Image (tube, helix red, strand yellow):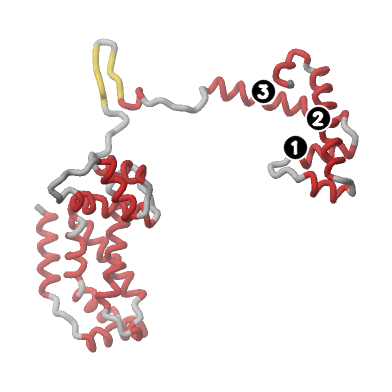
Amino acid sequence: MKSQSTRRHLIQAAMAAPYLQREEEYELAVRWKEHQDQAALHKITSAHMRLVISMASKFRHFGLAMNDLIQEGHVGLLEAAARFEPEREVRFSTYATWWIRASIQDYILRNWSIVRGGTSSAQKALFFNLRRLRARLNQGTEKISSTEMYREIATALKVSEGDVALMDSRLSGPDSSLNAPLMEDESGSADRQDFLVSNDPLPDEMVSASIDDERRVIWLRSALGVLSERELKIIRERRLQDDGATLEALGSKLGISKERVRQIETRAMEKLRVALLQANPDEAAFIA
């Protein structure tokens, strides 16, 4: 009841505020920009609160409190007032509309779901236009399939069909808690999260892999000792760096042909394999 009373008061105050003529609006904007006149700012924002309310009402179907939408729209209105340049001779309402809409949309994206949605311009366009486009496509006498609908929406908004399908599923129902009980019997209850499958390795597998990696690093460092200085340089630059040097680049650096670099590399790799096998005969399958 209190929220309805507050909203009613906001609407009444907005409707009672007088419209501003172009000359008066320009004068107020100049006073605010050049002298930070708070009275001028208040008069400009009060005269445009009906624009905020009108814009907020267009987003009421997202299920958020109308008072909050109006408040966020007012934030956008103040941002527009702070950035407005009266010398460009553009009406303030035209300039403020973008900021009001952007502020409300940002609030909806942050609060509509506990799961953070896409923040790119394409994802925002998909979020705010999917329902409208779907309703328009369903107006015809012949119903179209979901696949065809997703294809048309994806083409119109320049996103992938997969993104359209994912957003449609998100908008079709509310968030579900991972702790929501799915079943309950004599042995106890089971939550939704109990049935989620992780593709990550098990903890013991991760520890085992880490130990194996450390052991192999020690083996490799020991085996590198059998290489000559030039062989070691070639192996390090060709095999032990994320971006391995090309045969041609390494040949130019060493003053030899790229074919000679390849021959030295092949010989060095064979020497490493032999050294590793001699030091770790039980790991022959891994080394080979």
Asked whether 114 or 118 is in front, the reply is 118
Q: Look at the picture and state if 40 lies above or below 271.
A: below
> Secondary structure under badge 3?
helix
Alpha-carbon neighbours of circle 1 within 10 Å: few (<14), some, or many (≥20)? some
Is residue 64 visible in the rendered structure shown here?
Answer: no
Task: Residue under label 3, please give it.
Answer: 212
Q: CA distance from mark 1 to mark 2?
A: 10 Å
> Secondary structure under badge 2?
helix
Mark 1 residue type = Arg
The mark found on residue 239 in the picture is 1
> Secondary structure under badge 1?
helix
Q: Residue at x 24, y 13 (%)?
A: 185
Residue 38 shown left or right of residue 160 in the figure? left
Q: Quadrant of residue 100?
A: bottom left
Asked if labels 2 and 1 touch by Cβ distance under 8 angstroms, the answer is yes
Is residue 250 visible in the rendered structure shown here?
Answer: yes
Asked whether 46 or 244 is in front, the reply is 244
Report x, y in % for residue 64: 21, 51
> Which label lies toward us, 1 or 3?
1
Q: Quadrant of residue 73?
A: bottom left
Report x, y in % for residue 179: 30, 29
Q: Quadrant of residue 266?
A: top right
**Mark 1 or mark 2, earlier in chain:** 1
**Mark 2 or mark 3, earlier in chain:** 3
Q: CA distance from mark 2 to mark 3?
A: 21 Å
Q: Residue at x 75, y 45 (%)?
A: 245
Task: Residue under label 2, please give it.
Answer: 269
Mark 2 residue type = Met
**Mark 1 or mark 3, earlier in chain:** 3
Alpha-carbon neighbours of circle 2 within 10 Å: few (<14), some, or many (≥20)? some
Residue 258 shown left or right of residue 212 in the figure? right
